[in-house]
C-alpha cells in the first residue's frame, strides 16, 4: 500500500507549458497540509495526446509512466484530469487484461521497464477528498471565505468514462462542491454544469470551442457567481485565456475571474494571494480578492 | 441537385468487412449494439454547435461499411473526447472510443489534422506534447518551482520503436 501523504508529482504538458499558477498554488497548499511531493525527472507526457493518432502508443506511454512510479513504490499525483484519467484508465485496463499487459510489457522491455500494477494514479481533487480528508482540510482553513459566491467546473476526464474512472457521479458531481464549501465559500448551482469546456476543439474548430465556453460563462453569470473555480489546466486556459475574446466576439460582458481550486483553498488557509500566483490570471481577480481580505 | 448526387450512397462504396474490422479493435467491440436511438448526438456538446458533426451518423456509417467516407471526413476530428456519449449510450456502445478507433485508422492513411501530428511529433522528440518555452523553464526557478522533469525521449523512443506508427510520425514531424 502506497503512502497517503507522499506522492510522485506528475506535471504533464499543459501545466509547465502555460498554467504555472495551478502548480504554484497546488504545491503551497499541499505543503501546508503536510503532503510530500516527490519529483520524478523521468516522467513524460501521460500519453493522452497520442490516443487519437495511435491507441497503442498512448497505452505504452502511459504504462511507461506507471512502471516508473512502481519502481518508487509511490502513488502518482496529477493536477491535470487528462493525465489522471489516462493513467487511471490504462492502469485499470492493464491490471484486468493479461494479454494486453503482456503485449505492452513487451514494448516496455526495450527500455528495461515492466508494468506490474502495484500503484494508483490520483488527481489532486481525489487525493484531497480520499487521502487527506475533509476534516483535515477544514481544520486548515483559518480565513473562511464566507463572502465568496462561486461556481465550479469539473472537467470531463476526472469523471468520464465512469466505467474506467470510477470517481464521483459524472451526472451530478459533488466532490468539487464539497471541497469549495470547505473553504467557507458558497458554491452555486447553474445550468449545464457538467458541459465540456470546449478546449479539445481549439485548433480544429475554434468557433465551436468558443461557443461552448461562452455558454458556460453565460450560465455562470446568470446565477451571479463572482468567480468560476476549475481543477483542470485545459478548462482554465479555455475560460481564462478566452474570456476577453469571447466578450468581444459575442458582445458580452462577464468579468468573471477563473480561479484554480488550489488558489481558493490557499486563500482560505491564510496564504497570501502573491504566493498563490493570482497575478498570472488573465481575468482580473482583484475585486473578489478585496472582498476576501 | 449536384450535392444530392454526391450524398447518394453507391453500393460500390460499401465495405461489408469494415464493421468487423472496427469491432475487433480495442474500444470498438460494441459497435454492432447501436440501435440508432440518437442519445449520443443529442447530448454531444460539439454537435450542439456544429452543423455537420453527428456521432450517431458516424456510428451508422461505420456499421454500413462506408469506410472511405468515414475515414476521409474532417468531421471525425471534431469530437472533443468528453465521453458524455459513452456514459449515456443505453446500449453501452463506447461511442467516443469507436471514434478514436476510426481516427487511428484515418491517421494511418495520413488523414490527420496538423495539431495532432505536431503534438505526436513533439512527444517523440522531447517527451512533451508542446515545446515548453525556455522562458517558462527559466522562470520556474525564480518562482520557487523545482526544475522541469527532463523526461527521457531516448527511452520513450525505445519503448515505441516496435510500433510501426511511431516511425510514420517521426518522418512526418521532421
Ligand atoms: S447512444 Fe448508443 S445506441 Fe444510441 S445512437 Fe448513440 S451509439 Fe447508438
Ligand atoms: S465524446 Fe465526442 S462524440 Fe461523444 S459527446 Fe463528447 S464530443 Fe460528442
Image (spheres, coloured by chain):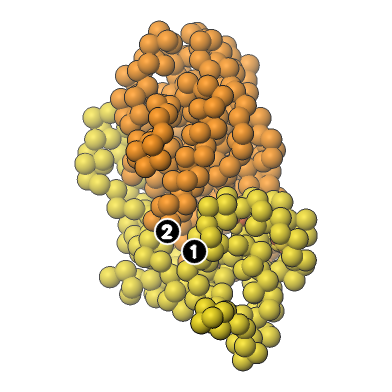
Q: Which residue is mark 2?
A: A204
Residue positioned 54% across, 81% down in the render: B1
Q: Which chain is yellow?
A: B
Query: Viewer-proximal residue, B93 or B64?
Result: B64
Q: Secondary structure at mark 2?
A: loop
Image coordinates of residue A149 in percent, x first then y, are 53, 18
Number of marks: 2
Query: Viewer-proximal residue, B138 or A81?
Result: A81
Dot 1 beta carbon under 8 Å from ligand 2? no
Image coordinates of residue A106 in percent, x first then y, are 54, 68
**Figure quadrant of residue A15:** top left
Task: Point out the quarter of the image occupied by ligand 2.
Answer: bottom right
Quick one: quadrant of the C terminus of chain A? top left
Residue positioned 55% across, 45% down in the render: A196
Asked if marks 2 and 1 touch (Cβ < 8 Å), the reply is yes
Quick one: quadrant of the N terminus of chain A? top right
What's the chain of the residue with tag 1? Answer: B
Outermost residue to the front: B1
Q: Secondary structure at mark 1?
A: helix
Q: Which residue is mark 1?
A: B77
Q: Mark yes or no: residue A223 visible.
A: yes
* Mark 2 vs mark 1, CA separation in Å: 7 Å
Q: Which chain is orange?
A: A
**Figure quadrant of residue B4:** bottom right
- A279 vs A178, left or right, is left
Query: Viewer-proximal residue, B117 or B128?
Result: B117
Image coordinates of residue A52 in percent, x first then y, are 50, 63
Image coordinates of residue A228 in percent, x first then y, are 49, 28
- A249 vs A35, left or right, is left
Please determine whether, in this image, residue A142 is positioned above or below residue A205: above
Amino acid at each position: 500500500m502506497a503512502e497517503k501523504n507522499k506522492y510522485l508529482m506528475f506535471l504533464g504538458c499543459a501545466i509547465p507549458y502555460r498554467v504555472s499558477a495551478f502548480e504554484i498554488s497546488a504545491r503551497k497548499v499541499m505543503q501546508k497540509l503536510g503532503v510530500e511531493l516527490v519529483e520524478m525527472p523521468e516522467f513524460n507526457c501521460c500519453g493522452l495526446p497520442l490516443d487519437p493518432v495511435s491507441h497503442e502508443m498512448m497505452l505504452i506511454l502511459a504504462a511507461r509512466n506507471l512502471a516508473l512510479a512502481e519502481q518508487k513504490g509511490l502513488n502518482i499525483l496529477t493536477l491535470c484530469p487528462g493525465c489522471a484519467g489516462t493513467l487511471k484508465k490504462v492502469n485499470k485496463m492493464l491490471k484486468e487484461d493479461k494479454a494486453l499487459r503482456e503485449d505492452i510489457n513487451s514494448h516496455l522491455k526495450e527500455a528495461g521497464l515492466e508494468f506490474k500494477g502495484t500503484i494508483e494514479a490520483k488527481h489532486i481533487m481525489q487525493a484531497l477528498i480520499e487521502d487527506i480528508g475533509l476534516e483535515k482540510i477544514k481544520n486548515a482553513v483559518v480565513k473562511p471565505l464566507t463572502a465568496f459566491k462561486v461556481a465550479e467546473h469539473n472537467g470531463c476526464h476526472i469523471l468520464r468514462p465512469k466505467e474506467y474512472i470510477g470517481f464521483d457521479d459524472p451526472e451530478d458531481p459533488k466532490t468539487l462542491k464539497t471541497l469549495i464549501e470547505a473553504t467557507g465559500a458558497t458554491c452555486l448551482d447553474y445550468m449545464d454544469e457538467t458541459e465540456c469546456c470546449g478546449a479539445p476543439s481549439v485548433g480544429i474548430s475554434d468557433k465551436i470551442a468558443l461557443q461552448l465556453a461562452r455558454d458556460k460563462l453565460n450560465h455562470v453569470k446568470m446565477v451571479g457567481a463572482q468567480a468560476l473555480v476549475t481543477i483542470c489546466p485545459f478548462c482554465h486556459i479555455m475560460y481564462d485565456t478566452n474570456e476577453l475574446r469571447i466578450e468581444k466576439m459575442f458582445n458580452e460582458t462577464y468579468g468573471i475571474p477563473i480561479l484554480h481550486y488550489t488558489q481558493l483553498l490557499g486563500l482560505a488557509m491564510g496564504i497570501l494571494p502573491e504566493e498563490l500566483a493570482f497575478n498570472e490570471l488573465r481575468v482580473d481577480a482583484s475585486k473578489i480578492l478585496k472582498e476576501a481580505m | 441537385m449536384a450535392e444530392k448526387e454526391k450524398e447518394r450512397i453507391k453500393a460500390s462504396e460499401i465495405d461489408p468487412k469494415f464493421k468487423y474490422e472496427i469491432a475487433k479493435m480495442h474500444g470498438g467491440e460494441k459497435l454492432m449494439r447501436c440501435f440508432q436511438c440518437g442519445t449520443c448526438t443529442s447530448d454531444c456538446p460539439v454537435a450542439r454547435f456544429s452543423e455537420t458533426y453527428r456521432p450517431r451518423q458516424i456510428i451508422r456509417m461505420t456499421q454500413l461499411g462506408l469506410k472511405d467516407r468515414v475515414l476521409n471526413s474532417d468531421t471525425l476530428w471534431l469530437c472533443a473526447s468528453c465521453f458524455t456519449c459513452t456514459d449515456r449510450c443505453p446500449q453501452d456502445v463506447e461511442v467516443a472510443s469507436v471514434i478514436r478507433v476510426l481516427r487511428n485508422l484515418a491517421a494511418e492513411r495520413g488523414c490527420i489534422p496538423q495539431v495532432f501530428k505536431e503534438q505526436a511529433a513533439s512527444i517523440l522528440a522531447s517527451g512533451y506534447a508542446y515545446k515548453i518555452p525556455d522562458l517558462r523553464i527559466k522562470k520556474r526557478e525564480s518562482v520557487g518551482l523545482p526544475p522541469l522533469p527532463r523526461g527521457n525521449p531516448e527511452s520513450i523512443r525505445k519503448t515505441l520503436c516496435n510500433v510501426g506508427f511511431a516511425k510514420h510520425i517521426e518522418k512526418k514531424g521532421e
